[in-house]
Image (cartoon, rainbow, N blue to C red):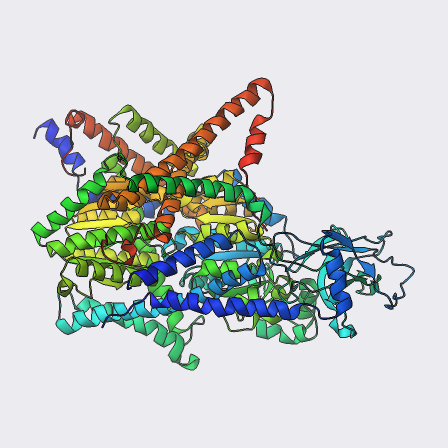
Amino acid sequence: MKRTVPLMIVMVGGILMMVQYFIPHQYSQVILDNYVEWAPIVGAFALILGVGSLTRLHTHKIRRKAKNWQYSWAVLIPLFGMPFFALIVPQSLGGGSEVHGVHDFLFMHIQVPIQSTMFSLLAFYIASAAFRAFRAKSALATILLLAAVIVMLGQVPIGDVLGKWLPNTGLWILRYPNLAAKRAIMLGVGFGMLATNLKIIFGVERNWLGGAGK
Amino acid sequence: MRINWIGIPAALILLMIPSLSAAQDSVENLTPTDDTVSEVVTEDAAAEETETQPVAGEPLLETDPGLDIPGMITVQDKPNNAGNQLVVTFEPAVNPEGIHCYNVYRRVIGEESEDTWNLVKVIPADEPSEFIDGYDPEYPIEPGILYEYKIASVSLEDAEYFGPVYGATVAAEGEWFHTDKVRLLIAASLFILLIFYYFGRAQRGAKMYLRPIAGIEAIDEAIGRATEMGKPILYVPGISTISDVATIASLTILGRVARKIAEYQTRIIVPNYDPIVYTVAEEVVKQAYLEAGRPDSYDQDSVFFLTQSQFAYVAGVNGIMMRDRPATNFYLGMFYAESLILAETGSLSGAIQIAGTDAVTQLPFFITTCDYTLIGEELYAASAYLGHEPKQIGAVKGQDACKAIVMSLITLALVLGILDLVANTHTLDWLRNLVTVSIVE
Amino acid sequence: MSAVNIWEKMLNVDRRWIFLGIGIVSIVPFLIGFGMPITTTIEVEGIFDYVDELGPDDAIFIGFDFAPGTQAENMPMAVAVMRHAFHNRIPVFMTAYVPLGKGMAVAALDYVTNPKTDGYYERVLFEDWADYREAGITNKEELTAAWESDGNVLSEGAAGWVFEGRDYVLLGYLPLFHLVILGMTGSIETQFPVDYHNNPIGGMPILMEHKSLREVDLALTTSGSAACTAWITYAREKIGLPIAFGVTGVMATDYFPYIQSGQIVGQMGGLRGAAEYEVLLKENGITRTTGKAFRGMDVQSAAHIFIILLIIMGNIAFFAGGFHKKTRLKGRR
């Protein structure tokens, strides 16, 4: 029963939405409209559960004085501090999410720089990964390496300075060989999606319901 | 306490049923009750297109001799919609001099008051005199209702000069099949049937070969390694939503991985980016522990929601890697620009890493920094590999058959393209028209 | 020390040296600024030309579909198109696919309307021009004339006025935004009854003239994740809304198929794409100077050269050390 009911819901819902796609009639539209209206509400409830889970995890850590429990404060304080300033503190005291409020200050001067720093790590890691991975071990690897160098130079102004052929060849690589490879993988992925969806709708794949299931 | 989260979608579907019947009622209520009007609809319903007729008794407004008025209005039901659109065409003024735009007014036939006219469209004088009515959310078209139209020539000074009122003899009706999607239906049916055919073959015991994928075979080894080292296993289910098939594929693998982990009595850490994915992942892991016969070993803090911010999530996961030092990291699902930061940090922490994604641009990063990478559809097939269930293997074979059809079409296109070049024919256009589907409403 | 050991050492170099090198090549060009010329590509010109042909009767959406993490790349794209739209008096709707994108939209608007920005636009808040609205003055030209005739003077250096609710509206973020896009194909107001500042959008001229996505002429989605494809799936394929992409450099190659298939009018890929748009703005007299992306291209040039040097060094060490003869290199180096 625990599995049959969800499987039935998935099967009915999946087939319904599949058929709905081909039926433009107003009755069919009502189903879609209802889904569009309801799904964000369900999503919002899930967010509450998510925040609850994060809070529970870190309160447990603090209570148990688990390893690195001090960091849990660094999660919990901003987690509740930001909405506190945005929603509870009156605007006269620097509350609200408007510009020049405490929330805006924290967002612009802590959250934005921290997250930008995380993204900028990519430049460092790409350099390190390129140094370790790009080897002309075989003919194919050499072609890959040359293509990478041409695209990298073609993407920056210095490529234009070194020669017009560099950006042009770089763009050619992006527009044709890259596109062909991308399309091939997309096709495989597309059919993979189709098969996975069918497996789920018709109950062949049940692992998403929990466990490895047989 | 166990909570059955699946109750939420169940309630959703239950709630849909009454709303569907409510919609049916509302449409019935909107059908005109006036016998004469109904008759007009019945008589003309068969005709796809019909000219509107000037409504008797409606006086023609006086016009400024200097500004010409538009002529006859034609109304057609727009096909392939929910009965909420009409195609309105009018004859523009013969003498366009001084006309800035046309104001199109509509009301339900039978309404008498002048207040009931709604301005539904303003058409600049130089634009085509045909438009689709019903797009304005403020004045929707209701199915089965007959409307009348009047159009005014508007001067630069905003003075309106009305043409005659025309009553439509055709009402908007919803269709039960979108005729522009026939080719799509045929293709979808063909592919679905192929997959089902292979489901069936596999079920009947046909031997099917699946080429070995190193990444999948390494999963057991990776779990074993973490167990030996007494370190946890980190499982990252990607940073996409539950509507992404890669996420679903990841959760199916999580079920199998979690079961093994439960059997080996190792710790699993599953940080989540999306709250809905979190609720499903939690249930998946909990159920895996139950099936492995170790429900008591399940730690409710092992699966948790982290944040829905891309790089804050990366920071959180990297923090876990550096503090808890998991022996094995799984990155399975959909990844974006953060993939390399995750995998490189994992590599720095010395973990064995198995990645899998259908995000093509992230594959090079995973291939560079991880020990094993599942490429594209291999991620979807992983569940079949791990389970060895006939139907699952059949699905993989079905996929291959679908790909074979597309590959044949691509080869045919190549041949036709060359033929066109050599013989100066247009055969490729024929093939392109055959497979191109325009589904824009 | 044997020669082999030097090569091995070189291959096993502590990656923190590489990080230090990247740090230096990132900071130095930023301080010096070479200002190397940038040629534009058809992918970016496609967006520019499309926006350039639009006017006050049209409208565009700018989707701030990124979190602060990728703002270095995504923000200049959104800012460039916003400035282009304000210059051509094209009304702009601003939305966010992710919660933090709302903050990014606010930051972009603040930047474009900040007196410190060269060629900034002076912002008039929705409540500040309520009297004019009540008097029925909603046309941009009439509104500007009436506003200035009442003693409001455009500051020196400002490129023009932008009226909230007339020239732009900041709608903000809603959960499951892909469904919000779907909903907006029918009506924008049903999805966003109020804007970011809680002003009812039903009374805004921008909305009265563009009630649904069907009455919008372009949606630019700036993103570091899957948000951009949602605009294709739910707006382009459903109602034919023209879409333009502004994506991070890491993801740019992913979306070339959409350009070739004609599903998008163009794409700005990474900082380079944003810099190209800035160059086009300057060349066409829309802005006097290029912006942050153009400046960042010097850094990118230096970083790319550094990475290429690293690859060359790695290969020299690999072959000179004879590692290519071994079946497997130790570790992942």
Query: Looking at the image, which residue sits at the far top?
Result: B422
Q: How many marks?
A: 0
Q: Residue at x 24, y 42 (%)?
A: B385
Residue C193 at x, y = what percent?
54, 70
In the displayed structure, C190 sits above or below A177; it is below
* Residue appearing at x 53%, y 24% in the figure: B416
Q: Is residue B335 visible?
A: no
Q: Is residue C107 left or right of residue B381?
A: right
**Would you place residue B47 above or below residue C131 in this image?**
above
Q: Position of residue C279 (x, y in %)?
A: 52, 44
Residue at image position (44%, 56%) is C65
Q: Quadrant of residue B71?
A: bottom right
> Is residue C72 visible in the rendered structure shown here?
yes
Q: Position of residue C69 (x, y in %)?
A: 36, 56
Q: Quadrant of the N terminus of chain C?
A: top left
Where is the C terminus of chain C found, in terms of image quarters? top left
Q: x%, y% of residue C37?
A: 48, 39
Name the foreground residue: C169 vs A95: C169
Q: Is residue C271 left or right of residue B280?
A: right
Q: In the image as oriented, which residue stretches furthest toward the front?
A: B204
Which residue occupies the foreground of this view, C141 or B270? B270
Query: In this rendering, would B438 be left or right of B322?
Result: right
